[in-house]
Every structure is written in C-alpha cells, then in structure tokens.
Image: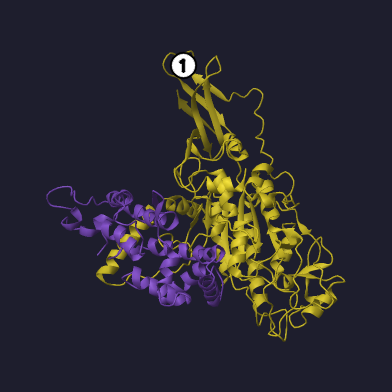
Chain colours: A purple, B yellow
Amino acid sequence: MIKNPADHVIGSLREMNTAFPPLSDWDKSYGLWNTFYNWMVNTGQTLHDPPNVSGMPAYYQEPSFHEIWINSDSLPKRNQFTDIMINTGYSRGGFRVQFNCVAFAQTLNNPGNPNDLIDETLNILFRNDLSAQSKAQIKTQILLTGQLYDYYWTNAWVAYISSPTTANFNTVNTRLKPLFQYFFNLSEYQLA
Amino acid sequence: MKRKDFLLSTIPAAAILPEVINGYSVKAFNSNSPLVQALMRGTTLTDHVLVIIQLSGGNDGLNMVIPVDAGYANYVNARSNVALPQNKVLPIAGVTGTGIHTAMTGLQSLFSEGKAKVIQAVGYPQPNFSHFRATDIWMSGSNSNQEVYSGWAGRYLNYEYPNFPTGYPNTDMPDPLAIQIGSSTTLTSQGSAANMGMSITNPTTFYNLISGTIDPAPATPAGKELTYIRTVNQQTQQYSTVIKAAANAVTQQGTYPANNSLGDQLKIVARLVSGGLKTRVYMVNFGGFDTHSVQVNAADTTTGNHATLLQRVSDAIKAFQDDLKQMGVEDRVVGMTYSEFGRRIKSNSSTGTDHGAAAPMFLFGSKIDPGMLGVNPTIPANASVNDNIPMQYDFRSVYATLLEKWFCLDKTIVDSLFPPNINAQLQSLPLIKAGACNTVTPPAPGNDEVLITNRANPFTSSTTIVFKTQGGRTFIQVIDTLGRMIKVLIDIDYPGPGTYTVPF
C-alpha cells in the first residue's frame, strides 16, 4: 500500500519521536497541529472533510486506488515536508517542532556502528529493506563522507556521546541530516 | 557586512524586503550591506564553470608533488620506505626543482600544454586532523575553531541566485545552480538557507546517467507500487528535463579511462557543460586516499595504492580536459583538486603515512596561469613523527581568487562571503590568466547595416519590429520621447545570429 498523507505526515512525526508542546499549552499545540493538518491538505487529504459522500477517491476509485495519492504535485510536496522537518521544522511561540536526527540515533541500540545505525533506522522507517550494495554506498557517501573506514564514524559518535559540545554535535548532525533526508526522499519511504 | 548578520538574517525564509529585483525579492540583508547594493546592479554575467574534485581521505601531497632540489635528501631521509627515486619523478614544464608522481603522466602533459598549475602547501592555521572536521572546514571555509553551517560555494550561489529554491527554475536560470555527482549534496553547496546543489544520483533521478546503485523493485505488489512511485518521482524532478536535454545534446565524447570512477564522473560533467547547462559549480568526489598502511609496494615505491589513485586522478583530468577541448568549451571550465588534509612528512613503519596538514592543490584549465605557485616545502633533516608541512597559502585565498578572477565578483563581495576574521587575510593569487573576466565585445555592425526597423510607421495601435542579432543576449526596450521605458520587448538569449520579428 502507498501511504496516505496522514500516514506520511503523522507517521514520520511519530517515527522520529518528534516532541510537541504540552497539551495544556493549547495555543502552541493547536497552532502546530494546524500546520501539520495543512500539510496533509496540501498533499491531498483533507481530514474530516472528504470531497463527497463516497469519501476519498483513493479508497474507491478504480483502477488506481491508492496510487491517486502520488502525483506530480503531491510527491515533491511530500519530499519537501520531510526536508523542511529535517532542516528547520516549524516554530510557534518559541517552541520548535523539528526532526532531531541525532536524538533519533541515540535511541538506537548501536548507533556508533554505521552499519547497525543504517539497518536499525531502515527497520523503523522502511517496510522493505534495501540491498546490501545500496546500504554500503549510502554509508560511504553520506555517513562517512567518502572515507573508507567505519571507525571514523564510530570515533565521531563516541566523541559526541562522551562530550556533547556544539562542535561534536555538528560533526554527527552534519552527516545524519543528509542521511535521513536521503531515506525520506527514497521512493521506498512512500510505501506503508 | 558582519558574518553574524549574514547568518542571522538568512535562517528563516520569513523576512523578505519589499524590493523586487528581476522579479526576485531580496532576502533581509541589511540594505546598507555591499551584498545588497551589488545585487541592485544585477548578478554577474558569466558562463564560467568551476569543477571541484574532492580527494577524500587525506592525500599524501608530499608524494604527489616532490622536491627534487637540495631538499630531496631530507625528503628521502624522512620517508625512506615510501620515497620515490629521484630519477622516477616526472619533471613539469616551466618548473625546476619540483616534480610530480611517476604515475601522473596525464597531468604532466597538461603542464606541457600550459593548462595546469600546482599550488604548494595549501592549508589553514591550526590544522585539524579529523577527517570529518577537516572536510567540514574545507567545505565551509571556516577557521578551525569556528563552526559555519553553510558552504563557500553555496554562499556564492546564494549571492548570485538569492532566495533559491523559491522561484526556481525560471527563465533566467532554468538549470540547477550546482551539481554534485554522487548520492547526496554536500556542505560545500549548502547556502545559508537552502542547499544550492542537486545531486544527480539522487535516488529518484537519472539512474541511467551514471552507474549509481538502485535496487530493482521486487516482484510483489509492493514492488509494483514502488515502480509507480519511482516513475512519478523521475517525471517530477524539476530539473530532470533540462539535465536530460543537456545530456542528450551531446552525442559524441572523447575517450575516458576505463575502471576509473573519477573519469566516469568527469565525463558526465563534460557532457552537461557542453550540452549547455548554465550550472556554475560541479562537485565530484574520489576517495581512498587514507593511506595509513601499504601506500606503496615495498619493492617498487613508484607503484602501489597511492600510485594507482594518482594515476586515476591524472588520467581522468587529462581525458576531461581533452574532451572539453574537442567539444570547444575548454575556455569556460576551470577545475581544482583538494583533499581535507595532507599527510605527515615522516612515513610510518607500515609503508604508509598518517594524517597531516598542508598539501598541494592542482588547478587545471586553458585559462589557468600555468606552472607552480609557492616553493618546495621545507623538510627538516631529521623529521619527527609530529612534523607537518607548514602552510604557504590559505585555502580560502584560493577560493576567494577563483570567485574574484574566475567568477568575476567584486572583491568586496568576495570578502563578504567569508567570515570577517578571515577576509582581512584573503590574498588575490595569480591563478587565472589576465582577462578571463573581460566582457566579450561583439563585432561592430557594419556602418550601413540597419539592425532594427518597424513596419507601419508611424502607427496608432500596433506595429511590427524586425531586428537582427549576432546571437547571445538580446535586449530591446521601447522608450518614449521623455525617456520613459514603455515596455521591454525582448530580453532573450538567442543561440545564433538571425533576423527576428516581434509585435508591439
């Protein structure tokens, strides 16, 4: 199945353990929820307001069905959404909702090993695994920025964990951000 | 302009000045800044292209560019197990006392043709020996104790094409601003707000242009949907059409070395440049230079891993340059190689070398001021394991010179693209031949040649204007007798000379 816009927007927010303001802060909460609601509208799904009594065409319209969700307008917007969430996110009243790739990596079992990091991340984000060849290429080109040895990533990660300074944070963040951006932009991510 | 202002003012896309230039609103830079004032004059017109070759891993510069003068004895002394025999070092045209690695015959012939330059000992103060950090420093142009989140080329492109990606592609810039051959865009092309580059092995595009990795869709219902999404993805990449058109415009290319991934990448660059893309910056990457051990074959130090790498670099650049020449675009392209750092003067006991500091850079292209800049590095008689090659030129000066002399930016603009504590030290180096930035003067029209006429003259409601152009950017305005501009009729790039008509 292809993800519907709610799956894509809310799903990615949940997968990335994105923090929202406390529910009691209704101003910030509703404002931010509205932002994400609008992203679903922009990518083709207006929740609580189906176009007619039959509901969303993707659930009944032969022969395309769920393929209706993906078109030349909605797909670039889906990628734009995840790009924005990785790079800047949205801010209301000083509370910024953003994908934190470093914090996500910290929740994994063995983020210091680039192979395990990619495997575990894909396990969460993707329904179908990538080939070993693809994963090796992604690791070398993005996570290792062209370096040959896994321990350069391990060293950078360990340095950040033992001493979370801005400089050490940036070293790992500069590499994790494009990694996640790449994963979210892969066509595989659109599959539920 | 203060760097802090530059960074602060460009983070959100929220603050937009009301001024609109060429239809683009200008970001909220302080309007007194030289950046905005220069912007009011319009962006720089140039068709120049820069190709950046990143040699990942830390290239051993001392075995790439070798002192063969009185310093040779100290060179052998410091690294006897990896040193090249003096008689195997290739001499380079116009330079005495310095040679290049035995395997770099291709580059040697480019030196003979006057199309290559070596800059000795390029680095920065307080070098960092971490691959990651050093790469980030080279890409951002920061100091080693400073974090900058945008890349130097990205800041340049951001100056030339403000507000990207909003409003792009457009008629003035239909093509990607920067192209990275590889699977992800890097910090180099990171502008202050958006990444200015696009990557053409992006998972969703152009699989067939480069031998990128793409998993076949499985023969399952999920695989069917995957294929569907990929198809839409390819169709909707906003630049896919122009890139494919440029690639398809070139039907014949020169011969490139086989099994050479750098050659494969440069072949695509040559094709896109020649195919007419206006993209200004291309980035390619070639890795494997982290030669801690077995850098050379012990039996013959002119062979081994490092020799193979350098030969591929040299062969690929030579093939690229020849291809550009054959396709008639070599005057538009300048290339440079860099690595995040060089290696120590003293070799280690595993016939390798460890992370070091300054290293030579190569520049190539027909508009390069050829030869060598700088002198052989000073090698101590008894080099210790901690001895590094002292820096002679700051890498930011190389960037700044390319921006000024190749991309024809005003020096004040160049300075504003670097942090203020750096730009005071930026040198203008002799890298590019004089005149590269002179505007091309079109041939003067014959005295009796009429370039523009109109039929129905005088007219009341409409007339037809006939004009001749030599090709290139052609601009026609209608101005009334008070000197007020009524309408811009033509502002188009014509591919060649011809006679055209336009209604008014």
Q: Percent x, y for residue B214?
A: 41, 68
Relative to B415, is B487 above or below?
above
- Chain ID, mark 1: B
From this view, report whether residue B21 is shown above or below residue B416.
above
Q: Quadrant of residue B383?
A: bottom right
Residue at the (70%, 68%) spot, across then down: B357
Q: Amino acid type of disc 1? A: Ala
Residue located beneath label 1 in the image: B456
Q: Position of residue B224 (x, y in %)?
A: 28, 66
The furthest residue to the front: A24
Image quarter in which the C terminus of chain B is found: top left
For the N terminus of chain B, the quadrant is top right
Q: Residue at x 64, y 22 (%)?
A: B448
Q: Does any portion of residue B497 appear in the rendered image? A: no
What percent of the width, then of the height, locates residue A66?
A: 23, 59
The correct choice, above or below, for A132 with respect to A71 in the image is below
**How far across and how far down the image is residue A14, in percent?**
32, 63
Q: Which image quadrant for residue A68?
A: bottom left
